[in-house]
Amino acid sequence: MTDSRWKHLLGQRGGGDIRSAAMDDRGDVPGWVLITLMTAGLVIILWGVAGPALSTVFQQAIDRVASF
């Protein structure tokens, strides 16, 4: 892709040049870290609540298959 094509595409995005467009996402790292930590927390909470029930369902399914 030519340089003028990149500038045209980035101009529509609101950036002035390639370097400023590449730097736009650098400040959002704390946001992504927070999202990752919150997702991990939700998984741990859901696993704690639903883990025993899912284990029971899985064990029942294995027992039914093994009884054939």
Image: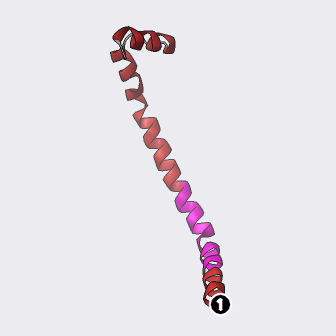
Measured from the top left, where is residue 41 in percent x and y?
Answer: 51, 55
Give above or below for 21 relative to 50: above
Q: Which residues are magenta?
A: 42-58
Residue 47, quarter of the rendered image:
bottom right
Callout 1: few (<14), some (14-19), or many (20+) C-alpha neighbours within 10 Å? few
Measured from the top left, where is residue 50 in percent x and y?
Answer: 62, 68
> Coloring scheme of the render?
secondary structure
Give above or below for 26 relative to 50: above
Q: Nearer the viewer, residue 68 or 48?
A: 68
Q: Is residue 45 left or right of residue 3?
A: right
Q: Which residue is mark 1?
A: 68
Residue 27, quarter of the rendered image:
top left
Q: Is residue 54 left or right of residue 2?
A: right
Marks counted in the figure total: 1
67 is within the stretch colored magenta: no
Measured from the top left, where is residue 39 in percent x and y?
Answer: 52, 50
- Name the residue located 61 percent from the left edge and 77 percent from the top edge: 58
- Name the residue located 65 percent from the left edge and 90 percent from the top edge: 68
Q: Is the magenta region chiefly helix, strand or loop?
A: helix
Q: Nearer the viewer, residue 53 or 61?
A: 61
